[in-house]
């Protein structure tokens, strides 16, 4: 069975990558350059935006399902 391609726009990928970046910034901040810190920060903001979008979409789907069940 072929390996499943990683969806870099998925919530799971974005959340896991965001955790990796946070871990790097929390534990290795003194070992990385300012340019790298800024790069990680920028990537983190993009990932946060993806996560928020995916969570909002899920919330809307749940609300729709709930409203359909009540009618």
Image (cartoon, rainbow, N blue to C red):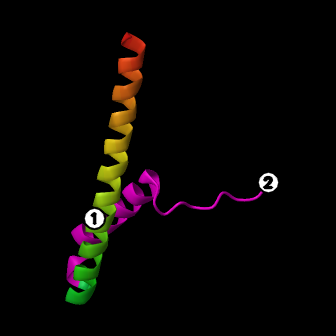
Q: Residue furthest top?
A: 71
Q: Main secondary structure of the magenta part?
A: helix
Residue 57 position within the rendered picture, expressed as x and y whole percent measured from the top left: 36, 43
| Residue 21 is one of the magenta-drawn residues | yes
Reading the image, the residue beneath label 2 is 1
Asked if 64 appears above or below 48 in the picture, the reply is: above
Is 57 left, or right, of 36 in this rendering? Answer: right
Q: Secondary structure beneath disc 1?
A: helix
Residue 66 visible from this viewpoint: yes
**Where's the N terminus, which quadrant?**
bottom right
Q: Nearer the viewer, residue 14 or 64?
A: 64
Estimate how packed mark 2 is, as few (under 14), some (14 to 19) or many (20 or more) residues with alpha carbons within 10 Å: few
Reading the image, the residue beneath label 1 is 22
Q: Nearer the viewer, residue 51 or 65?
A: 65
Residue 9 position within the rendered picture, expressed as x and y whole percent measured from the top left: 45, 60
Estimate how packed mark 1 is, as few (under 14), some (14 to 19) or many (20 or more) residues with alpha carbons within 10 Å: some
Q: Secondary structure beneath disc 2?
A: loop
| Residue 58 is one of the magenta-drawn residues | no
Q: What are the residue bounds of the magenta stretch?
A: 1-30
């Amino acid at each position: 069975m072929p390996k499943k391609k990683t969806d870099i726009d998925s919530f799971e990928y974005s959340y896991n990558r965001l955790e990796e970046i946070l871990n790097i910034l929390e534990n290795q901040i003194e070992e990385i350059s300012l340019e790298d810190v800024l790069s990680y920060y920028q990537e983190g903001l993009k990932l946060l935006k993806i996560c928020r979008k995916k969570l909002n979409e899920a919330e809307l789907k749940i609300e729709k399902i709930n409203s359909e069940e009540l009618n």
